Amino acid sequence: MRSKLIGSIAIGLLLGGLGALAIFNNAGDKAGTTQSGAALIGGPFQLTDTTGKAVTDEDFRGRYMLVFFGFTNCPDICPAGLQLIGAALDKLGDKADKVVPIFVSVDPERDTPQKLAIYVKNFDNRVVGLTGTPEQIDAIAKAYRVFFEKTPNASAPNEYGINHTSIIYLMGPDGKYVDHFTPMTGIDAMVEKLDKRLG
């Protein structure tokens, strides 16, 4: 069981890493000498927060977003990522007010707004939990280049797992991609990068 879990985590990290490497649009001239590093991550979305209110990407304009995808039944990668985010925000002090941490569920079948509300508050009161219809989750996952798929449990169909990209995306106040982290990023390394951005 543990080896299967570790394998699932490794797949998620690998796919996340591959996704991060494949998100840049390098446009060259005819000689192939000019490149642009515009990231093809992010975009408009409409989801539901933990109060049942419909929210869009526009609701977060003017602040940085730390966007992390996962699910409430995730055994360790999601808790590790959310703990990292909370610890980094604590170390940033007042500058953390410029950042909105967002946890998007890739398991809308089980992660109701009420369940998400309880889950995210276990890590940090600042985390905004978002869910939606399967179509809405598919749309935001596609926009953020996030991979996810169910891993069936033959003995307990309702207890399926989900392999998913484990990247924490830093989006700018304009909603555009800025940087990314993983749940394995060191707290000090994350704080240093955030601190430089927040001024």
Image (spheres, rainbow, N blue to C red):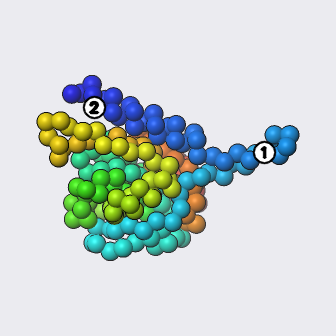
Kindly tell me whether residue 80 is visible in this rendering. no
**Rendered position, 22 above or below 47:** above
**Rendered position, 20 above or below 176:** above
Kindly tell me whether residue 177 is visible in this rendering. yes
Question: Which residue does the image show at 42% across and 36% down from the upper left?
Answer: 13
Question: In this view, which residue lies farthest toward the left?
Answer: 155
**Rendered position, 9 above or below 129:** above
Image coordinates for residue 185, horizontal then vertical, percent: 45, 40
Q: Earlier in the sequence, mark 2 or mark 1?
A: 2
Image coordinates for residue 150, horizontal then vertical, percent: 30, 43
Specify the amino acid type for callout 2: Leu
Question: Which residue does the image show at 32% across and 74% down from the upper left?
Answer: 53
* Quadrant, the C terminus: bottom right
The residue to which callout 2 is attached is 5
Number of on-image labels? 2
Question: Foreground residue, 96 or 168?
Answer: 168
Question: Which residue does the image show at 32% across and 46% down from the upper left?
Answer: 78
Q: Secondary structure at mark 1?
A: loop
Please tell me the numbered disc located at residue 28. Answer: 1
Estimate how packed mark 1 is, as few (under 14), some (14 to 19) or many (20 or more) residues with alpha carbons within 10 Å. Answer: few
Please tell me the numbered disc located at residue 125. Answer: none
Question: In this view, which residue lies farthest toward the right?
Answer: 31
Image coordinates for residue 37, horizontal then vertical, percent: 68, 48
**Residues under labels 2 and 1: Cα distance?**
42 Å
* Left or right, 64 with reference to 127: right
Residue 108, quarter of the rendered image: bottom left
